[in-house]
Amino acid sequence: MLKVTGKHRCVAGVVALVVVVLMLVVPPGFSTNAQVERPSDRKASGFVHEPQLYRTLFHTVFLLNEQAEEAERAGRTDVAQALRRAFKQEAGLEVEQGVVLDRLAAACEQAVRAVDARARAILAARRANYPDGKLGAGQPPLPPSAELFALQREREAVVLRYRDQLQEAFGRSVWERFERWVLMPLDAGLRAGGAQRYEPVEDGSVEYSSETGNLPTQAGESIVTGSVLISYDPETNLVTGVATTELDYAAQDWYVGQVACSLRDGDGNRLVSQSAYDTDEDGVVSVIVQTVGQAGMAYSAEGSYKLRLVVQDTIGRYLDYWDYPAGVSAGTGILGYYAWYRGRGPLQWRPTWNRFLGRLTAPLQRALVLSGNPRFTANPITAATDHTHVDVDVEVRTAADVIQPGDFAVLAISVSSKPPGASVNFISGTNVNVPLNIADLSTGRFTLSVSKPGQYRFGVSVVDVRRPDGQGGSYSILNRVTVNAGAVTDPPLTAN
């Protein structure tokens, strides 16, 4: 049973965001065949510990869907909608891709729980050595369990198998975009944050490294993960925060997880907060909080992570076996912020049961561009013409640190439907650059010609968001921008 609290909606404020509203008009114009400058095909090397990353991904998706079902049963359809769309809209997933992710997340959760059940039997037998959570006089704690380490590797292999299935189902192009949204920003943030690991060397000892990696858990160390997600749903006007902490099997031998999640406004005021600890001791505990948004306000979600020490000696000191570092190495990814804590001892004795790990704060700072390849109402073009154009108005509302002067969106246009035998020539090209002005509208124009009169329908999508580099080129800032989430479709289209 998952531990989830704070599921009820509370009144508060709205996320800092950028909104691009597309509105089309059609009067006389012309084009070239300019090619859109695509985001670079960057590849991240040395990703963070992938089993934990994908476990967090799949579990978060499963948890949100599970709570959405509960909200639907309670008649809270707006809450359910916001929960189902959280994460997916920030990842820029299409509906079909979201369905695939939901299916694999549920299957992964079921498979992981099957391994968990075997581990819990071993953990229960080991805990039986400490009646009432206490060591006997002169009794040493048990050494780490080789069986638990082996099961942890099996669990990690299960998660990676579902990662591979997700990659296969998405296909190359979608997966590369998913990597850019999920893994690359996270990996870069963890590197910048000084994430640490310990690696075995040839003589069997352990060597310290400051790099990230995707090695499986090594015998002699233990991992606790924490994540916090913030999401804004423009249709329901709800802000959702999710914080989760999860202990590997070696950690569950000595600790119980505790997590708190809060939503804060732009001034840092706490709007809603809940906490929970792992009452059934299955190694994972999550908290979901929601608040109603108010236009023009900025929000952040904060996750706070603690361990409860559960074994005492005869004089009341608590055993902190793995001695996890206090502090957080975190990166911004699609899950908001993510961290892991690696403990490898030596064991410590502490006067209280409380072991604070750290906090993660996830600001909602991505730009939000309205919605995925909107298609516009078919309207008559009454005569063959070589000078018709489609105007696209772009409105930006966001925190000033997200969009900077000179930033622009790359828009693409396509023909959704046209009269039989008709042809459309985009004389100015199928892509245009539209400046992003925070305080004002800006307009992009597609110039086109048509070979015959009739009903035409066009679609427009945002394919990139870019920042000038001062050399006549640009680089993408798409990983800070949520594209195609919630546009008004089918606005009126007029034609000459």
Image: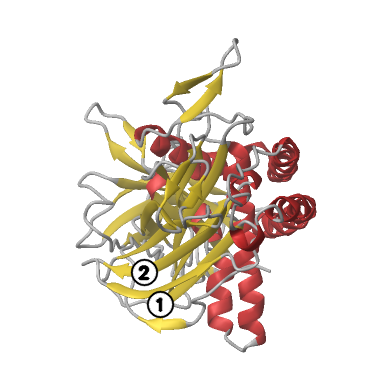
Query: Looking at this view, is 279 or 53 the one in front?
Result: 279
Query: Looking at this view, is 97 or 23 the one in front?
Result: 97
Query: Looking at this view, is 55 or 477 the one in front?
Result: 55
- Report the number of discs: 2
Q: Which amino acid, mark 1? A: Thr
Can the viewer see residue 311? yes
Q: Residue at x 37, y 56 (%)?
A: 362
Spot occupied by residue 139 in the image (x, y as percentages of width and height): 61, 45
Spot occupied by residue 442 in the image (x, y as percentages of width and height): 26, 58
Q: Quadrant of the C terminus?
A: bottom left
Q: Which amino acid, mark 2? A: Leu
- Please name which of the two marks, 1 or 2, marks the residue nearer to the observer: 2
Q: Quadrant of the N terminus?
A: bottom right
Element class at badge 2: strand
Q: Residues within 10 Å of mark 2 (few under 14, many from 20)?
A: many
Label drawn at residue 250: none
Residue designated by label 1: 291
Can the viewer see residue 384? no
Spot occupied by residue 483 in the image (x, y as percentages of width and height): 46, 54
Q: Residues within 10 Å of mark 1 (few under 14, many from 20)?
A: many
Marks 1,2: beta carbons within 8 A: yes
Inter-mark Cα distance, 1 to 2? 8 Å
Upstream in the sequence, badge 1 or badge 2? Answer: 2
Spot occupied by residue 17 in the image (x, y as percentages of width and height): 33, 62
Q: Residue at x 55, y 70 (%)?
A: 83
Please indicate whether residue 192 sits to the left or right of residue 348 in the image: left
Q: Residue at x 31, y 30 (%)?
A: 473
Please indicate whether residue 284 sits to the left or right of residue 308 in the image: right
Whether 25 is drawn above or below 403: the answer is below
Residue designated by label 2: 263
Whether 122 is drawn above or below 457: the answer is above
